């Protein structure tokens, strides 16, 4: 807004260091997770009913791929619910290690398979009935390549259930964890260098990134209109879309959100979470 130094001084009173941690400390926390099967079941119900409005059902005969699986929460929940063929893929080694540890601790048998790989580089001859990509599309380099890879990973009639937080949303910079108050559209208004300096000082001291795209975990700053273009270019169509479902429990916020997010162009700036079900353009519309 006013340059790196002035923006830094303007924002510094609004930050805190309560969540400050080094990468080594994050690795240690990952090894001592308190995640339970009850947590997994609650998460799965939210995915099925809140995010995708009951349009998904867990079927033991269906194969599932969980891209960007993180520490394996969804993969474990799917296996616990009866899915017999679940594969989770994540690029962060500590996430995959923790996912394997959690599965071993929580599931006596029928454990998901976890692989540590960049999905753009992952070599597999398999295809899947249902692909999940929740909470990671805004973090990957070349998101267009991720979407373009989905058709080759989908079985005929398969579906990809994806989520995305556009960078131009009120919280699109993903920096709320060290701000005392919500400053909407922070990433659009203030200097990137000022925000990254605050992040290093108050949140992740061992991450030297000076740009959003270089932080551990990445942030690609993808906009909603780019997301739509990448979907079209990949030969996919949107069968179902759900915008800001997290707000519907807080009426009238949900009603206001449903109205304003439909306003052409302006609505893009209020789409905090977007959930979609994607299919190949020439595939049938039957929901699994």
Image (cartoon, rainbow, N blue to C red):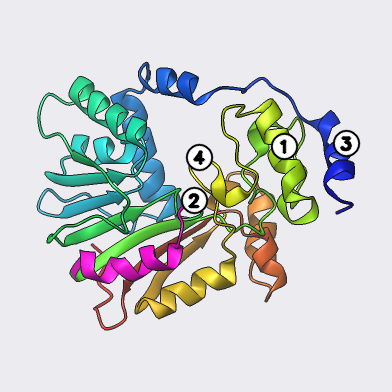
Secondary structure under tag 3 reads helix
Q: Which mark is residue 216?
A: 4
Task: Give me the C-alpha separation between circle 4 and circle 1.
Answer: 15 Å
| Relative height, residue 24 to residue 128 (above, below) | above
Q: Position of residue 226 (x, y in %)?
A: 55, 71
Q: Choose top left, top right, bottom left or bottom right for residue 114.
A: top left
**For the residues bearing labels 4 and 2, Cβ distance under 8 angstroms:** no
**For the residues bearing labels 3 and 2, Cβ distance under 8 angstroms:** no
The magenta segment: 140-155
Viewer-proximal residue, 257 or 8? 8
Q: Which residue is mark 1?
A: 197
Task: Name which of mark 4 and mark 2 comes first in the sequence.
Answer: 2
Q: Who's the residue at 64% across and 44% down the image?
A: 250
Task: Give me the C-alpha separation between circle 3 and circle 1.
Answer: 11 Å
Residues packed near mark 4 inside 10 Å, few (<14), some (14 to 19) or many (20 plus):
some
Q: Main secondary structure of the magenta part?
A: helix
Q: Which residue is mark 3?
A: 9
Task: Name which of mark 2 and mark 1 comes first in the sequence.
Answer: 2
Q: Who's the residue at 70% across and 52% down the image?
A: 170
**For the residues bearing labels 2 and 1, Cβ distance under 8 angstroms:** no
Which-is-in-front pick, marks 3 and 2? 3
Secondary structure under tag 2 reads loop
Task: Name which of mark 4 and mark 3 comes first in the sequence.
Answer: 3
Which-is-in-front pick, marks 2 and 1? 1
Q: Is residue 142 rendered magenta in the image?
A: yes
């Amino acid at each position: 807004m006013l340059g790196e130094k002035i923006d830094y001084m303007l924002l510094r009173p609004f930050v805190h260091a309560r969540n400050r941690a080094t990468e080594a400390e994050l690795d240690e926390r990952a090894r001592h997770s308190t995640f339970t099967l009850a947590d997994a079941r609650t998460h799965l119900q939210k995915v099925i009913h809140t995010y995708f409005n009951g349009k998904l059902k867990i079927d033991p005969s269906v194969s599932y791929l969980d891209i960007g699986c993180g520490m394996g929460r969804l993969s474990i929940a799917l296996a616990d619910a009866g899915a017999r063929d679940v594969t989770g893929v994540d690029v962060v080694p500590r996430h995959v290690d923790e996912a394997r540890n959690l599965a071993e601790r929580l599931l006596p048998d029928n454990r998901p398979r976890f692989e540590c790989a960049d999905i753009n580089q992952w070599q597999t001859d398999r295809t899947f009935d249902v692909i999940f990509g929740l909470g990671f599309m805004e973090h990957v380099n070349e998101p267009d390549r991720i979407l373009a890879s989905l058709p080759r990973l989908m079985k005929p009639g398969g579906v990809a259930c994806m989520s995305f937080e556009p960078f131009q949303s009120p919280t699109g910079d993903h920096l709320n964890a060290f701000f005392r108050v919500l400053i909407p559209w922070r990433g659009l208004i203030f200097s990137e260098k000022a925000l990254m300096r605050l992040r290093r000082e108050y949140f992740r001291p061992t991450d030297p990134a000076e740009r959003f795209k270089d932080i551990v975990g990445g942030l690609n700053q993808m906009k909603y209109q780019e997301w739509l273009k990448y979907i079209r270019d990949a030969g996919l169509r949107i069968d179902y879309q759900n915008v800001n479902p997290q707000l519907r429990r807080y009426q009238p916020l949900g009603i206001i959100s449903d109205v304003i997010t439909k306003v052409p162009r302006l609505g893009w700036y209020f789409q905090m979470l977007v959930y979609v079900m994607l299919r190949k353009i020439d595939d049938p519309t039957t929901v699994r």
